[in-house]
Image: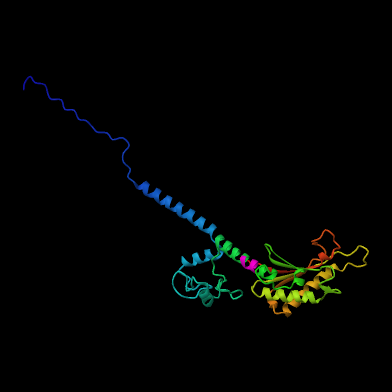
Amino acid sequence: MSGSPAPIIIKRKKVIAGGHHGGAWKVAYADFVTAMMAFFLLMWLLGATNEKQRKGIADYFNPTIPINRVSGGGDGAFGGDSIFSQDTLARSGTGAGVTVQSASNAAKGDNGIEPSDDQKGAASSQETDDLQDIADKLSGRAGESMVSDLLQRHVIARLTDEGLIVEVFDIPGAPLFEGDAEPTDEMEAVAAVVTEVFRLASNDIAVQGHTAAVPMAARENPVWELSSSRADAVRELLVADGLPPGRMQRVTGFADRKPVSADLLSIRNNRIEIILLRRKL
């Protein structure tokens, strides 16, 4: 040992750069992303629903209100209401409608759910078919005519966006009115037939009067009063023949403002339009 050198001991220190800070930031980031997703879902929901639907959703998530303003008072997600509008009417007063009921549409009421575009399209298509069927019965294309050959000369039926328009017009030698607004036998017969056909539906009805222009030499222009009084006379005929007065929605006189003939003085412009209106979807 006297001449041997002392051993050399080397200590190596392991240095780790940066260090480990844990995964807490991942949890915070996940919470942030979840909150943002919930926020965007809420904004989409507010934009995609109507006022009644938003109120229903708010009431569902607000258990401090035991009874809604229109609630039936029961428990559950619907607050006592039913998803069937016929039952909703009896419980909360806002269900199946009683204005218009039929076998195909027995619940036409406010149930807080608006029909989709497909449902509106199907209903509109069905109504168009029904109106066309009524037009066929009136014109005789569906079989035996409900109008005599004489009356057929006075009547044209056409289907429009407004509804089924039955146009009744003067022909030479066979006017629809005597004097100012006294219906002739032909007009009374046409009104009776229209009443019979319109009983096949429950749609509302409008009556429009039109007249030919009068010569400029006339001292007074009576076309406004004449068209209005004739339209109202036809309304009275329809009601007298059995159509409910409540179905009459409007009676209008257009004077000579909407001619169908290029000759403004032509008697062809003397006409009455009886319209079976489309329902509002």
**Front position in the image: 188 or 68:** 188
Side of 174 relative to 165 (left or right): right
The answer to whether residue 233 is visible is: no
Asked if residue 163 lies in the magenta stretch, the reply is: no
Side of 18 relative to 66 (left or right): left
**Front position in the image: 192 or 208:** 192
Q: Which residues make up the magenta segment?
A: 129-133
Residue appearing at x 15%, y 25% in the figure? 8
Side of 2 relative to 8 (left or right): left
Residue appearing at x 58%, y 63% in the figure? 120
**Front position in the image: 79 or 28:** 79
Residue 146 at x, y = what percent? 69, 73
The answer to whether residue 176 is visible is: yes
Secondary structure, magenta segment, majority class? helix
Image quarter of the C terminus: bottom right
Residue 255 at x, y = what percent? 82, 66
- Say above or below: 10 vs 198: above
- Name the quadrant containing residue 145: bottom right
Residue appearing at x 81%, y 60% in the figure? 261
- Identify the image's colour scheme: rainbow, by chain, secondary structure or one colour: rainbow
Image quarter of the N terminus: top left
**Front position in the image: 25 or 74:** 74
- Name the quadrant containing residue 208: bottom right
Residue appearing at x 37%, y 47% in the figure? 26
Residue 254 at x, y = what percent? 79, 66
